[in-house]
């Protein structure tokens, strides 16, 4: 990829996002939650730090979901049969996404509590 124009590299990245959208139900679910978080930001209109925290958290969850999907796809291609180590690796990848999603939930709850307290 070195030496290719930025437009071409962005094309590869957007192709990856489209592939994840088509192939990964979890990615679509996380996009839905990201949309709900965006609506909550607009409705609650919290202080700017919450916008940044929510944005970073959304990016973290989506990036980990993309990484999870990519690595699982590569693993399945290289080792299509069942193997305990392959299963363990895929479980750990899913666990990483779960940890990020739980962190996002904590950020969301903290934002709502903080914003509602400011409205009092």
Image (cartoon, rainbow, N blue to C red):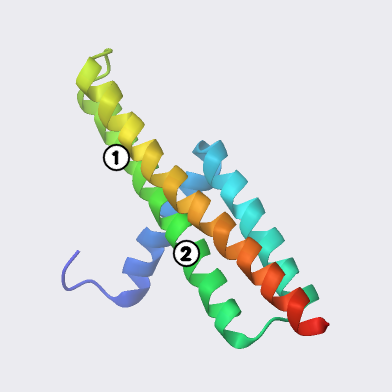
- Residue 116, image x, y percentages: 77, 75
- Residue 59 versus residue 99: which sits nearer the camera? 99
The answer to which quarter of the image holds residue 77 is: top left
**Quick one: quadrant of the C terminus?**
bottom right
Which residue: 53% across, 79% down? 52
For label 2, the crowd category at 10 Å Cα-Cα, with few meaning under 14, some 14 to 19 and many 20 or more, is some
Q: CA distance from mark 1 to mark 2?
A: 18 Å
Label for residue 59? 2
In the depicted structure, whether residue 81 falls above or below residue 101: above
The answer to whether residue 22 is above or below residue 33 is: above
Label 2's element? helix
Say if 65 sits above or below 54 in the image: above
Residue 107 coordinates in the image, percent (x, y): 56, 64
First in sequence: mark 1 vs mark 2: 2
The quarter of the rendered structure image containing the N terminus is bottom left
Marks 1, 2: nearer the viewer: 2
Left or right of 80, for residue 53? right
Q: Nearer the viewer, residue 7 or 39?
A: 39
Mark 1 Cα-neighbour bin, 10 Å: few <14, some 14–19, many ≥20: some
Which quadrant would residue 49 be assigned to in this image?
bottom right
Q: Specify whether 22 is left or right of 63.
A: right
Residue drawn at x 54%, y 40% as measured from the top left? 26
Provide the residue designation for mark 1: 71
Q: Residue 104: x, y in percent?
A: 53, 58
Give me the residue at 32% from left, 76% from top.
Answer: 6
């Amino acid at each position: 990829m070195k030496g290719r124009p930025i437009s071409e590299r962005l094309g590869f990245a957007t192709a990856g996002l489209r592939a994840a959208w088509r192939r990964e139900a979890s990615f679509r679910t996380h996009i839905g939650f990201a949309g709900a978080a965006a609506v909550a930001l607009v409705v609650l209109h919290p202080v700017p730090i919450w916008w940044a925290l929510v944005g970073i958290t959304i990016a973290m969850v989506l990036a980990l979901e993309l990484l999870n999907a990519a690595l699982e796809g590569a693993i399945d291609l290289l080792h299509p049969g069942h193997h305990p180590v392959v299963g363990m690796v895929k479980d750990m990848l899913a666990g990483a996404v779960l940890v990020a999603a739980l962190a996002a939930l904590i950020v969301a709850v903290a934002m709502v509590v903080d914003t509602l307290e400011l409205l009092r």
